[in-house]
Amino acid sequence: MGQLYDFAIVGAGAAGLSAAQYGARANLKTLVIEELAPGGQALLIDNLENYPGIVEPINGYDLSDRMRTQAERFGSSFLDASVLKVHRAAGHFVIETSSGPVESLTVLVATGAEHRQLGIPGEQAFVGKGVSYCATCDGPFFKSKRMLVVGGGDAACDEATYLSKLSGQIVMIHRRDRFRAQKALAERVLSNPSIEVRFNTIAKEIRGDTKLRSIVLEDVVNHKVVEEPFEAIFVFIGSIPRTGFLTDTGVQMDETGYIVTDCGMQSSVPGLFAAGDVRSTPFRQLITAAADGAIAAHSAANYIDEQRGQAYR
């Protein structure tokens, strides 16, 4: 057997990076496995202004970089690889990765979730040509242009506000008659003169030639359909948890595919924990993900002590 870790973390978003720091500080041999850049969804944040203690806004990349540096200083290791499968073997877990197997006494799933798509004609054809799921990534390409934002949650309101700094021609649609975002975020959008909000409206089709030219919209109350010119559409309609590699574990998930945990972040599989956006939780924010990660690391340390008969009573 190769090196056996105490605590293997799959995913380096806020939850994973927080867990890495607390795991290492608890003297656990900790490894973080991430296929992309550390930071997860936080990398998309242009100005983070609601994280406790961060008085002056900071962008998500800088915060994530600091969290990784902090975790490394406490002793966590990082592996750039994709996770293919997780299964149990001889009292521990084996994580099959694109760089080979990793063995660990406990595993934390902190893989987050991926953007949900509209599933309408033209969406796939114009990805990268006007269709985007990241305003801070692609918004600057459409300065002063007419853009459509789809969604009604925190992310949609945040991104619409960001785009309004780039253009005074932002149209925001939501399929319901009010936003589900936090009140402060919703009011910021509704009072923004650069954003035209249309409730009870959905996107039906995306049209164009070499790039996006127009979008077909429908009012779901009177069923009126119109085609309007747009240069870009930014979609923020929820997420799908990244749990495909857990099929062999038998871990319990809720009806939407999020991992069910107890208050210690442990799943239905002993030794397997979940934290952040991949977990079934009523509120998904950077601060709650970080808190989940800290709790998961603490619980993993307790679990290992119990298995070794060293639990503090």
Image (tube, grey):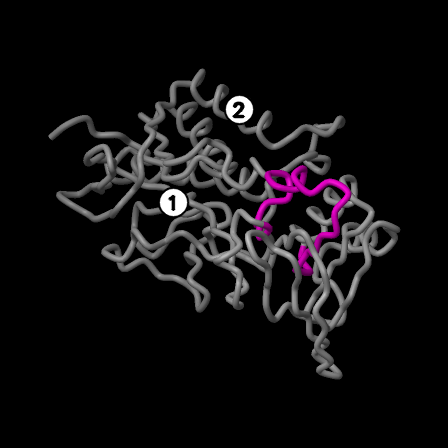
Amino acid type at mark 2 = Asp
Q: Position of residue 232 (x, y in %)?
A: 65, 52
Q: Say if mark 2 contacts mark 1, CB within 8 Å.
A: no
At 70% across and 69% down in the image, what residue appears? 227
Part of the protein shown in magenta = 130-153
Q: Position of residue 82 (x, y in %)?
A: 31, 39
Q: Foreground residue, 137 or 78?
A: 137
Q: With respect to residue 249, does 4 lie above or below?
A: above
- Upstream in the sequence, badge 2 or badge 1? 2
Q: Which mark is residue 256?
A: none
Circle 2 or circle 1, nearest the eye = 2
Q: Is residue 46 left or right of residue 299?
A: right
Quadrant housing residue 186: bottom right
Q: Foreground residue, 86 or 128?
A: 128
- In the picture of the structure, the residue carrying the numbered disc 1 is 109
Q: With respect to residue 226, does 189 lie above or below?
A: above
- In the picture of the structure, the residue carrying the numbered disc 2 is 65
